[in-house]
Amino acid sequence: MILKNCTFYNEFFEKEFGDIKIEKGKIAEIGIFAEDGTDMSGKIIFPGFVDIHIHGAAGGDTGDNSAEALDKMSAYLAENGVTSFCPTTMSRPVEELIESAKIIADYKPCGAKIAGINFEGPFISKEKCGSQNPEYITAGSCGDFDALYGAAGGLMKLITIAPETFDSGEFINKASKQITVAIGHTNATAKECKAAFKKGVSHVTHLYNAMSQMTSREAGAVGAALDSDVTCELICDGYHISSEVLRNTFKILGGDRAVVVSDSMRAAGLGTGEFELGGQTVYVKENDAVARLENGTIAASVTNLFAEFKNLLSFGIDFKTALKSCTINPAKVIKEDENIGSIAVGKCADFTVVDEELNIKEVYINGTRA
């Protein structure tokens, strides 16, 4: 298969023109070829977007522990330009999380493909639990990690912990050798966060949200993250983080450390209503673009990565940085950047195709139109 007359963003995220030859779902060659193919004139080809933190969408949720729920998420994401994702759990009993991992590991996607599993909890802080159910929050152990890792069949890519809530040094040391360990839902001091970074934590879950904040005399988790070289997730729906804070944060993080995530739940794509999230009831109300608990606390987003990408452009984030933060940067966090996240020979032929107004026209996953 050959895509002809392509305007695309190459592996350096610079605009290029040429033809893309696809073989066995991979990009086999990029150049100018004499053979006929599919004419892509008038379109722009981005790398497929990668969402490494998503609980649910279109009525399905990772915690439903069913292929049907994953089908809903996979199809919705493909429609919205996301070609790879990490179904993300919430704080539940470890036995239930093991069951989730087994179901995901056996799942055959109908749209966007699964790049890994993200465990957000249950080894987090009750003080900063957000919409996570505190009933299921517990201290982490290496035994629990081994059980989750084994059940995931090699798909476990990311886990969030609050390092101050248990003796986490051994856990971080062990887990970080196999997957990416993040801090989040944490009330840790800057000193405690920096100690965790030294032990192997390399990522921060939804920066600013559900963590100790930066003040003039205590940097907290936010300040420690910004004053480091770790990657940081950002929910860019315009509600979880203000546009002013996002602009300043991108200035600090630069082009390689910002990772846009949706953190969406089952209400994404469904509009207003009452929904379930992690065993709790949340509400999406008229003229509100987030899900909230009954007390008004923001529980999760109802957005998607492509919408956030367009938000970033409207907020004044430069195009290259915005595109990288939705594609190659998240792929690097889960160590899948040799396969996905950019348009380069040898990588999966995952493309989000748009027109000049950034309307999605086509999506390709492993070279097949979704």
Image (tube, helix red, strand yellow):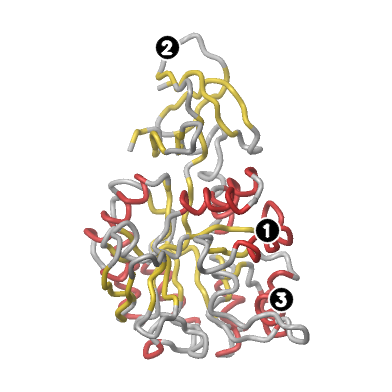
Disc 2: CA contacts within 10 A as few (<14), some (14-19) or many (>=20): few
Badge 3 local density, few (<14 within 10 Å), some, or many (20+)? many
Secondary structure type for disc 1: helix
Q: Earlier in the sequence, mark 3 or mark 2?
A: 2
According to the image, label 3 marks what residue? 224
From the top left corner, tell me how far across and down residue 272 is, in percent: 29, 65
Which numbered disc, 1 or 3, marks the residue closer to the eye? 1
Q: Earlier in the sequence, mark 1 or mark 3?
A: 3
Report the mark closest to the observer, 3 or 2. Answer: 3
Between the C-alphas of marks 3 and 2, the distance is 54 Å
Q: CA distance from mark 1 to mark 3?
A: 15 Å
Secondary element at tag 2? loop
Residue at (55, 75) in percent of width and height: 209
Q: Position of residue 210 (x, y in %)?
A: 53, 79
208 to 40, vertically: above or below: below
Residue 298 at x, y = what percent?
A: 44, 76
The amino acid at mark 1 is Phe
Q: Which residue is mark 2?
A: 36
- The three-letter code of the residue at mark 3 reads Ala
Task: Tell me residue 261's x, y (percent).
Answer: 50, 60
Q: Residue at x 43, y 69 (%)?
A: 149
Q: Residue furthest top?
A: 34
Type of amino acid at the residue the image marks with label 2? Asp
Q: Which residue is mark 1?
A: 250
Sequence order check, earlier mark of 2 and 1: 2
Residue 14 occupies quadrant: top right
Closer to the eye: label 2 or 1: 1
